[in-house]
Amino acid sequence: MSKFRYTGVFTTAVLAALVLAMLAAGCTGTETGSAVVQDGQTASITDGFGRSVTVPSPPESVVCSGSGCLRYLVYLQSQDLAVGVDDIEKKEQAMEGRPYALAYGSQFKDLPLIGEFRGKDDPEKILAINPQVIFKTGSTGTAYGTSAAEADKLQEKTGIPVVAFPYGSLRNDAEKAEMYGGLRVMGQVLGKEDRAEEVIAYIEATIADLERRTGDIPESEQKAAYVGGVSSAGAHGIISTEPAYPPFLWVHARNVAAGLGTAHADVAKEALVDWDPEYIFIDAGTIQIEGDGAIGELKTDPALQGLSAAKEGRVYGVLPYNFYNVNYETVFADAYFIGKTLYPDRFADIDPVEKADEIYTFFVGKPVFEDHNSEYRGLGFAEIPL
């Protein structure tokens, strides 16, 4: 088990489920939906697209292709196995929005290149590095996703086992199943099944803790909130939002943009004015736009200046979590800050900054909140003066 404490998060049921999952993995060598057959030197696994792949067991070197793939390797505490990276890991970012890169960026920048970001692999470069396994992922339903066909093609070109899976998300049960499946498949290949189950249990227990704190708030007493400037393949202005913004769902805030789908959406400015939410949260990634993006709009647009939240000082900054796919640790950190802001009595025992560093330490091994927030001028977890 991890050395980190789970104060106020784990429940007896979750711990029991985790122990049972670990015992099952140790006794049978199999996981539901992803069979593992081991002979001591290799393992035959079924990846996230139903492909049977034979891999060294466990591998001594890997590369990660596609948005978020290296993040999962860090979650499973196997970053030292990476022997090559795509070009985003080697770029100097004006604002580094990935906690795993804040924790291990200097290590990754020194590794050889395997191709361009978003899964645009260079088979010749990968062959020159000669990893034992290639992991490949991407966001389902987007231009940056991956597929069984792409995995087969890369495997044919390199002769190296390619284990592929959808990245998933926490927006709905289907995408959560994809996420957990990807973590489990990667864990099986790496011999990190226990850590994969630990990560999954931590996620479930954290969501359960947020639900325990706020689940009994009557709908009539739930705070109306909007999140704007949400990052999505870059920075955006005030109309950029997420109708199924997970932190709002978990703390039972009433998302005024709910009902517009589950993914990223741009809303009409007139609709935002009409909704007039009690609270506005701004993704701090918006400041990469000239004029400070959503913050500048709230300061200068007469219609937006009339919003109750803007006039009465209820505009707050949250850290961006969409940066080369979803940084789940930041999703959870934001959720606790939002919960504390909307329902302070329900989160009286929570210091959002301390909680954020607990979460970052669990997922990426280091407490990186201060480094992360400083890149966004300290706007995260603070009231934004207008």
Image (cartoon, rainbow, N blue to C red):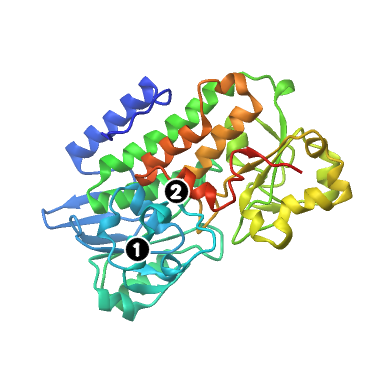
Q: Quadrant of residue 281?
A: top right
Is the Cβ of the residue at disc 1 closer than 8 Å to that at disc 2? no
| Residue at the bottom extreme, as displayed | 124
Residue placed at 50% from the left, 59% from the top? 324
Residue 61: percent from the left, percent from the top? 23, 63
In this rendering, would 378 be left or right of 61?
right
Residue 108's disc number? 1
- In the image shown, does 345 or 212 lie closer to the viewer? 345
Q: Is any part of residue 369 visible from this angle?
A: yes
- Rendered position, 193 above or below 154: above
**Number of callouts:** 2
Q: For mark 2, does the 10 Å Cα neighbourhood hold few (<14), some (14 to 19), or many (20 or more) residues?
A: many
Q: Residue tagged by mark 2? A: 178
- Rendered position, 301 above or below 60: above
Residue placed at 27% from the left, 33% from the top? 3
Q: Mark 1 or mark 2: which is in front?
A: 1
Residue 97: percent from the left, percent from the top? 51, 55
Give the residue type at disc 1. Answer: Phe
Residue 291: percent from the left, percent from the top? 73, 59
Residue placed at 38% from the left, 52% from the top? 103
Helix, strand or loop at label 1? It is helix
* Cα separation between marks 1 and 2: 26 Å
Image quadrant for the C terminus? Answer: top right
Give the residue type at disc 2. Answer: Glu
Q: For mark 1, does the 10 Å Cα neighbourhood hold few (<14), some (14 to 19), or many (20 or more) residues?
A: many
| Residue at the left extreme, as displayed | 40
- Rendered position, 64 above or below 116: above
Residue 100: percent from the left, percent from the top? 41, 52
Residue placed at 27% from the left, 29% from the top? 19
In this rendering, would 338 be left or right of 191?
right
